Amino acid sequence: MSFINEKRLASCPDVDTGRKRELLLFEKHAGIKFKRIQLLNLAFSHRSFSNEYQGSIENNEKLEFLGDSVLGMVVSEYLFIQFASMDEGDFARIKSFVVSEESLSEIAKRLKVDNFILIGKGEEYSGGRNKKAILADCLEAIIGAYYLDSGLKAVRLFILDSLIPEINKVLENKHKKDYKTLLQEFVQKNFKSYPKYALIKNTGPDHDKIFWIEVEVDGNSYGPGKGKNKKEAEQIAAGIAYKSIISKKPSV
């Protein structure tokens, strides 16, 4: 049974001959094949593009929402089956890295997602094709679209082909550290509390904001971390705090 009807497909951005060639090139590079190429095109359609489009079309945010859930389920299933001796905490630690914005944006770059994203002019001028949040969200939208188009078996293969190397990085401790998780675990263990993040300010226009965030640990403030979104700013603030605290407690 199809989840997508003709009315829903009609709300996807148009796919002309030139755009179809581009999408077929992406499919070849990513090792996937859509039955309905319109869904893949919709997965590439950022909100800024749909806002400027002449006509009424959807953007990729609903597909991103779906893809996030499918991604989480597939990764959780793989960990559960392949690493039966690990506990829930290990599963959560590995999963938090491999489905993070940092990890997904790197995978998106490898798949050349940035070459195919449809974005508005303002977002284009501000470097939107290289923004980690946009790349990660687009990859999740592609996962959601592929699930609707070809089913769970096909999308599972696509996800695992991309993410098993990232899972192995965590197992070998070669991954880029998630400082928010490291800081929280350290603070819980040593101070019996949690880090508290606070937005200090944000600057710039809506399409190109910079966020400044501080984190409080045991009565001390660290930062601010500066980033293109709150998650990035929090991660940088957490890194500042973690490195500072650890340097003062070498025995921990």
Image (cartoon, rainbow, N blue to C red):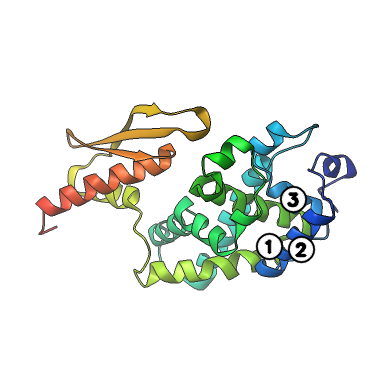
Quadrant hosting residue 17: bottom right
For the point 56% across and 48% down, the residue is 129
Question: Nearest the camera: 117 or 200?
Answer: 117
Q: Which residue is mark 3?
A: 41
Closer to viewer: mark 1 or mark 3: 3
Q: Is residue 33 left or right of residue 223?
A: right
Inspect the image, locate mark 1, and give the three-letter code of the amino acid beneath it: Val
Q: Which residue is mark 1?
A: 155
- Disc with the residue nearer the chain's start (3 vs 2): 2
Inspect the image, locate mark 2, and give the three-letter code of the amino acid beneath it: Leu
Q: Is residue 185 visible?
A: yes
Q: Is residue 90 above or below residue 52?
A: below
Question: Nearest the camera: 76 or 226?
Answer: 226
Q: Could you tell me if the residues under marks 1 and 3 are in contact, i.e. CB atoms within 8 Å?
A: no
Q: Is residue 215 above or below residue 39?
A: above
Q: Is residue 49 left or right of residue 182?
A: right
Q: Which residue is mark 2?
A: 24
- Disc with the residue nearer the chain's start (1 vs 3): 3
Crowd tier of the residue under label 1, counting other residues whose Cα lies within 10 Å: few below 14, some 14–19, many 20 or above:
many
Callout 1: helix, strand or loop?
A: helix
Callout 3: helix, strand or loop?
A: helix
Quadrant hosting residue 147: bottom right
CA separation, marks 1 and 3?
A: 17 Å
Q: Is residue 207 above or below residue 106?
A: above
Callout 2: helix, strand or loop?
A: helix
